[in-house]
Image (cartoon, grey):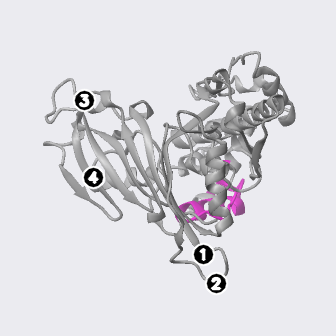
């Protein structure tokens, strides 16, 4: 199976809530100080696109906000807002950049965040299939089908775990343990195979010069992460240096480890559900833990409605989830109290609930066609999957549940 053979093979369109769209106005007023746009992009990560937009429009980067993070290796459409105070006149109606464009939607009462996302629509071409794999797609969709759609355990996808891409552990785990030198080194000073551009230069320079901060500063480019090394060179401790990283990076580090723990809890619960009902489950191996998907008939209404809180400070789990959470913490040899940190300047392991089961609605699977990129052999077919997912759910996790 191959996805993302070309960016056009993976299309995502963010769909806003009706309330947000209804609240937009064509003209700015005191109650609507934010200009909302549709950002269309190709082969650009959302954080990079936001920086490009800010630079092109001459706007401070902190005034550009996205509702969600969309894939780099894809063609995507999403909503962003820009504080209209940054514009001398009215906001531009259209604007084109290299690989991205903006289209004005209207003026909004508040900046974009995840709460304005109703769902995401995906159109994904799956390539290098043989006839058996095409049949398996349909069979598994039926295995997971509920009256609402295709139900699957709402795991975080491995895109969430980029801060552990070096294969040496999660910097968020080091934060929980209070080892800020290790947290900082894993976050920005440990090379990974997929590092590119300035990030590649940064990680390799720090790996070479760790501890010799003047030499490190001479070798790394001007980028936001440099502030942490500036702090160390000035005599700061590793905790204060970690807190000099961009806030987005700090949050990603904590979120990644929390998501890993959440997956571990959900995986244990999914296995228990399958075992209790003897309905069976599919299990897809993964570098960050297997993705277990019970049969739809094993998911009672109570199970489908279940939410598991993100492991965090002071979190308590209900009686059905608690033993699986305890086992997941034991596997990690982690004291849950270590997630209750008060020394991070407001940065914390949050505790928002996450649905245990996600539902892909309006799923369609096209009849297989010849894969235009296929060479010889039997795996020469392609199929297109189209579906809606709730915000925060991962298309790649659904594809794994469907055997891809």
Distance from the alpha carbon under mark 4 to that under mark 3 = 20 Å
Distance from the alpha carbon under mark 1 to that under mark 2 = 7 Å
- Going from the N terminus, do you reach mark 4 or mark 3 first? 3
User: Residue at left 63%, top 55%?
Assistant: 137
**Which residue has dot 1 on it?**
380
Q: Position of residue 180 (x, y in %)?
A: 71, 39
Range shown magenta: 187-214
**Which residue has dot 4 on it?**
102
> Secondary structure under badge 1?
loop
Residue 255: mark:
none
Q: Nearer the viewer, mark 2 or mark 4?
A: 2
Decide if residue 393 is on the left or right side of residue 377.
left
Pointer 1 with pointer 2, Cβ within 8 A: yes
Pointer 2 with pointer 4, Cβ within 8 A: no
Q: Is residue 79 visible?
A: yes
Of 381 and 14, nearer the camera is: 381
Residue 376: mark:
2
Q: Nearer the viewer, mark 1 or mark 3?
A: 1
**Which residue has dot 3 on it?**
22
Distance from the alpha carbon under mark 1 to that under mark 3 = 46 Å
- Relative to 365, residue 37 above or below: above
């Amino acid at each position: 199976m191959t996805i993302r053979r070309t960016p056009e093979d993976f299309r995502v369109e963010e769909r806003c809530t009706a309330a947000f769209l209804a609240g937009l106005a064509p003209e700015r007023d005191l109650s609507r100080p934010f200009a909302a746009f549709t950002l269309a992009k190709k082969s650009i990560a959302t954080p990079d696109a936001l920086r490009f937009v800010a630079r092109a429009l001459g706007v401070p980067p902190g005034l550009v906000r996205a509702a969600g993070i969309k894939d780099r290796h894809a063609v995507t459409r999403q909503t962003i807002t820009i504080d209209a105070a940054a514009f001398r006149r009215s906001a531009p109606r259209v604007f084109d950049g290299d690989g991205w464009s903006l289209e004005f939607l209207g003026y909004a009462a508040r900046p974009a965040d995840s709460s304005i996302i109703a769902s995401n629509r995906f159109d994904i071409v799956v390539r290098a299939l043989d006839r058996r794999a095409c049949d398996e797609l349909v069979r598994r969709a039926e295995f997971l089908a509920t009256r609402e759609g295709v139900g699957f355990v709402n795991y975080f996808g491995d895109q969430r775990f980029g801060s552990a891409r070096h294969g040496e552990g999660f910097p968020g785990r080091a934060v929980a343990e209070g080892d800020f030198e290790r947290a900082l080194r894993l976050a920005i000073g440990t090379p990974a195979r997929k590092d590119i551009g300035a990030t590649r230069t940064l990680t390799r320079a720090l790996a070479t010069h760790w501890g010799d901060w003047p030499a490190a500063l001479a070798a790394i480019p001007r980028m936001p992460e440099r502030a942490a090394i500036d702090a160390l060179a000035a005599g700061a401790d590793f905790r204060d240096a970690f807190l000099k990283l961009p806030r987005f990076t700090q949050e990603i580090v904590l979120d990644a480890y929390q998501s890993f723990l959440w997956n571990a809890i959900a995986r244990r619960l999914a296995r228990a559900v399958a075992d209790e009902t003897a309905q069976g489950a599919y299990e897809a191996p993964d570098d960050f833990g297997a993705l277990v998907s019970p049969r739809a008939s094993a998911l009672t209404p109570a199970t489908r409605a279940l939410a598991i809180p993100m492991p965090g400070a002071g979190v308590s789990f209900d009686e059905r989830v608690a033993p699986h959470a305890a086992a997941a913490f034991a596997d990690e040899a982690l004291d849950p109290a270590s997630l209750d940190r008060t020394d991070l300047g407001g940065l914390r392991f949050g505790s928002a609930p996450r649905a245990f089961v996600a539902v892909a609605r309006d799923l369609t699977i096209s009849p297989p066609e010849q894969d235009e990129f296929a060479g010889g052999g039997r795996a020469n077919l392609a199929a297109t999957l189209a579906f809606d997912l709730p915000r925060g759910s991962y298309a790649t996790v659904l594809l794994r549940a469907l055997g891809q």
